[in-house]
Image: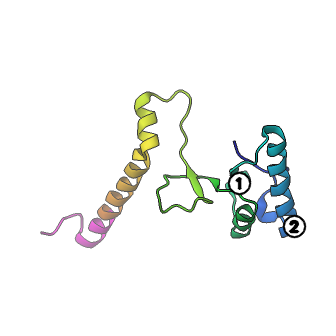
Amino acid sequence: IGCHSMDHEHINHLDAEVLRDDIRQSKEAVRTVLGSAPAGYCFPFGAFSEEAVGVLRREGFRYACMTRPGFNDHFTDPYKLQRTTIFGDASIAEFVCAAAGLEEWLRGSFRLVRNLLRIRDSSNGNRWEE
């Protein structure tokens, strides 16, 4: 269980003091209910800033999530985690594909093929050279 803010303001519109207070109040509200401080934070509207990441680090958070879709690996900044959406009516196969990052990999592969075809079409008049 993590925090999401107190007032759900767009963090890029907050000055440093208001941002810090909002994050602290959210953390304390969760601590009061659960008895321990939350480890995670989810940026309202998925918006983040380096300033907010710094506040989260100083406040003892270990990770934060954005709303940007994508797959995370060991190189991903733990304060800029991307998300994978899995809907409640997903089949087991859809769940496994989404959780394994296959959907994102396929999207990237299709973009690569599409770009290669565009390059081919623009340079060769629709013909592959050998």
Q: Using the image, determine if residue 118 lies above or below residue 39.
A: below
Instruction: Return the residue at label 1.
Output: 43
Amino acid tagged 2: Glu
The residue closer to the viewer here, 125 or 79, is 79
Q: Residue at coordinates 63% horizontally, 54% vertically from top-left?
A: 66
Q: Which residues are magenta?
A: 118-130
Q: Give how far across and how far down residue 126 sits, in percent.
A: 23, 63
Instruction: Give the SS element for disc 2.
Output: helix
Q: Which quadrant of the structure image shows residue 129?
A: bottom left
The residue closer to the viewer here, 22 or 33, is 33
Res 78 label: none
Q: Give how far across and how far down residue 104 sits, in percent.
A: 44, 50
| Residue projecting furthest to the front | 35
Q: Residue at coordinates 72% horizontally, 61% vertically from top-left?
A: 56
Q: Which quadrant of the structure image shows residue 16?
A: bottom right
Please state which of the two labelled residues, at mark 1 or mark 2, is closer to the viewer.
Answer: 2
The residue closer to the viewer here, 61 or 112, is 61
The residue closer to the viewer here, 112 or 127, is 112
Amino acid tagged 1: Phe
The tag earlier along the polypeptide, 1 or 2, is 2
| Residue projecting furthest to the left | 130
Q: Give how far across and how far down residue 71 sits, in percent.
A: 48, 52
Q: CA distance from mark 1 to mark 2?
A: 17 Å
Res 17 label: 2
Q: Residue at coordinates 39% horizontally, 45% vertically from top-left?
A: 102
Instruction: Give the SS element for disc 1.
Output: loop
Left or right of residue 111: residue 30: right
Q: Quick one: label 1, few (<14), some, or many (20+) residues within 10 Å?
A: many
